[in-house]
Image (cartoon, rainbow, N blue to C red):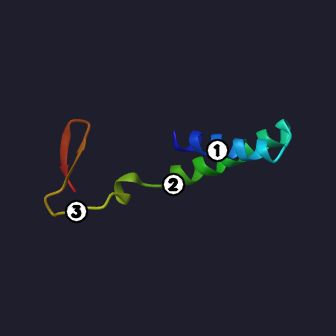
Amino acid sequence: MVILSNIESLNSVLIKREISKKNRLKVLIDTVTEQRKVLDEIDIVKSLKKKKETTYIEIKGKTQKD
């Protein structure tokens, strides 16, 4: 969803700049590829901040102490 929102905004900017449809498509595809690569490299569990020692993360019905 994040990527979709980003490329919709980018497409709007490119249209305002009168970039051709062919060139817009190339820019949008390149942007999606780059953003997917970045998001795929993020380990979401490690990026969560622990607030307290008693904070737990629930994964598929199992409670696992952080």
Front: mark 1 or 3: 1
Q: What residue sits right under mark 2 in the picture?
A: 41
Mark 2 neighbour class, 10 Å CA radius: few under 14, some 14 to 19, many 20 or more: few
At a point 52% along the width and 51% down the height, the residue shown is 39
Q: Position of residue 38 (x, y in %)?
A: 56, 54
Specify the label residue 51 is tagged with: 3
Residue at 19% over, 40% down: 62
Q: Amino acid at mark 3?
A: Lys
In this picture, is 53 found above or below 19? Answer: below
Q: Which mark is residue 9?
A: 1
Quadrant in the picture for the C terminus: bottom left
Pick whichever, 62 or 9, lies toward us. Answer: 9
| SS at badge 2 | helix
Q: Residue at x 51, y 54 (%)?
A: 41
SS under mark 1: helix
C-alpha span from label 1 to label 2? 23 Å
